[in-house]
Image: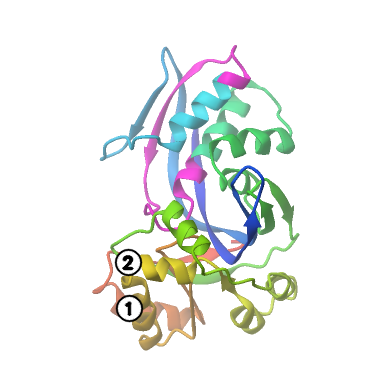
Amino acid sequence: MKKFANAKVNLALNVTGINEKGYHDLDMIMAPVSLGDIVEIVPSRTDHVEFAGMDVPENNTVTKALEVMHDAFPHISNYSVRIEKRVPEQAGLAGGSADAAAVIDAIDQLEGLELSMERKIGLGVLVGADVPFCLVNETARVQGIGEKIRPLGTDWAFPVLLVKPKQGVSTPQAFKKWDEGCRLQLDVDRVEQAICDQDMEALKAAMVNALEGPAKQLVPEIEEAIEKMRQAGISRVMMTGSGSALMGFDKLDVLKKAAEGLRDEFAFVQIVQAGSGG
């Protein structure tokens, strides 16, 4: 079975505090994008994970997803999983989480488990905070540590230019910087309203990411990349997730022209469709 594992972007990310278990509570709006990895999974004598053209990353989400599914359902088959990576790592695009969600979804189908979305979300959060959203895979308000998901019920989709600076951002380090004093509290309701109204100008004005400041401190190249995207004519630029990937918002012809020049500066430059209707 082959699955297309959609990456995601954050149109809003607010850190609301730290819960009793020491995890950061979040309030986010996330949207799937048309960029994704290809996940191929087939029954096998033993579990096996392969990443095409690269070494298998240590502590990867695919191996963890297999472990979670075996723990929950001891009777299921073993599986061989092959990942063709197209989503850059340490970018804030949830490539690894999308792969894990695809594995959970595929095993559910191959084994005839007929799991409810609530059950799959419960399994996904054991792998990682973004996995539940990648299972739902539609524009949604996401809260808690990623397990509370409320789809916005919109089919609005729009082009976004993704640019990834060479250096990535460590998610734990970004949260540590937030802990040390970048504790902005941001208004996510305005972003949700703009999306429900399908109002791009309102969205560009309202979008927020509490981790952008901390990420810039860790990776100064992010600020430089933002400035280069603005110089290329893009009217609104914001980081997604914990970075380091950046999103450019404008009319499609503006994004296409900007992309041509930016490809000389950055290894990853791609226009994608963001939103449930993409």
Can you identify the residue that label 2 sits on?
165
**Residue 142 location, quadrant:** bottom right
Viewer-closest of 145 and 39: 145
Amino acid under label 2?
Pro
Question: In the figure, 60 relative to 67: above or below?
Answer: below
Residue 246 placement (x, y as % from top left): 43, 69
> For the magenta stretch, what is the residue range?
71-99
Give the quarter of the figure containing the C terminus: bottom right
**Residue 104 location, quadrant:** top right
Is 229 left, or right, of 11 in this rendering? left
Q: How many neighbours does mark 1 have within 10 angstroms: few (below 14), some (14-19), or many (20 or more)?
A: few
Q: Earlier in the sequence, mark 2 or mark 1?
A: 2
Can you identify the residue that label 1 sits on?
224
Amino acid under label 1?
Glu
Residue shown at 26%/40% (left/top)? 54
Viewer-closest of 7 and 40: 7
Residue shown at 34%/82% (left/top)? 228
Viewer-closest of 67 and 136: 67
